[in-house]
Amino acid sequence: MAIAKINSLSRRPRRKVGNTRKAVDARSKEMSKHAAAGLTRRTNEVRIGMRLKHARLAKGYTLKELAGVVDCSESMISKVENDKLRPSIAMLHRFAQALETNIASLIAEPDPGIGLVSIVRSNRRPRIHVDPELQGGDVWLERIITPSNGGLLQAHVLNLAPGSRSDGLIRHVGEELSFVISGEVDIEVDGKIYPLRAGDSAFFPSSLAHGYYNKGKQITRILWVNTPPSF
């Protein structure tokens, strides 16, 4: 099943937008005003621009063709490829699906030489930061499993600033587990809201439309595990 973005049925606050293309284009225009200054680099942050461009060219897509597949503008993709704009997690999923890969592979090639044991130090976790305006606040993923060829699991620590949320709902092939390390979060699965606090967990088929919302007043940290790899 292809990854799909679905309108949310939750009671959480929602942005008032006409459609995905208009919302992304508006944000892209705003970011262009600050392009000269560039985006602030954060500790261990990984930029996907060059890898996204390489994956696009490897599949033979022009900017216009890929924009048509993922429902955004050519300008938006160009800004992402030049690291002048961070996409939302939902948009990263759509890029990965269109390019027949996953988000981890857009960040780094699997390491065939890692052996049976892979160690990722707490201060060396690669991070993916996404556009805070598209998700209501800062959201970033910390990768805790090194990508490997044929790997069956994928795990990240998902960090949600107060007021941040998923950019709509998504669904895809597989299963996933979320374990709340700290803070609180509302997880929406198949139209139902499940409030979770530190120590709580949720497990569900990824084919059910799902998303999240941090309505609390502190950063929420969630261990999120997927199989097969999709992030």
Image (spheres, rainbow, N blue to C red):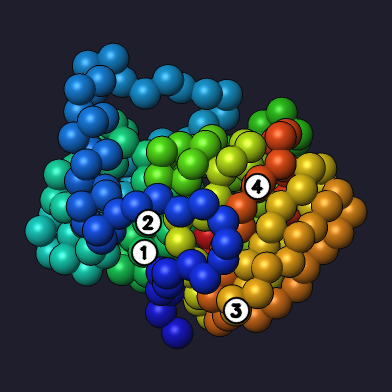
Q: Residues within 10 Å of mark 3 (few under 14, many from 20)?
A: some
Q: Are marks 4 and 1 in contact (CB under 8 Å)?
A: no
Q: Which residue does the image show at 69% across and 58% down from the upper left? A: 186
Residue 94: give its label.
1
Distance Cα–Cα, label 1 vs label 3: 20 Å
Residue 77 is at least partly visible in this image: no
- Camera-near label (4 vs 1) is 4
Quadrant in the picture for residue 57: bottom left
In this view, the residue in front, 46 or 214, is 214
Q: Which residue is mark 4?
A: 214
In this view, the residue in front, 71 or 195, is 195
Q: Are marks 1 and 3 in contact (CB under 8 Å)?
A: no
Please state which amino acid type lies under the numbered disc 1.
Arg
Please state which amino acid type lies under the numbered disc 2.
Met
Mark 4 vs 1, N-terminal side: 1
Q: Are marks 2 and 1 in contact (CB under 8 Å)?
A: yes
Residue 91's place in the image compared with 26, above or below, is below
Tag 2 secondary structure: helix
Mark 4 vs 2, N-terminal side: 2
Distance Cα–Cα, label 4 vs label 2: 19 Å
Mark 3 vs 2, N-terminal side: 2
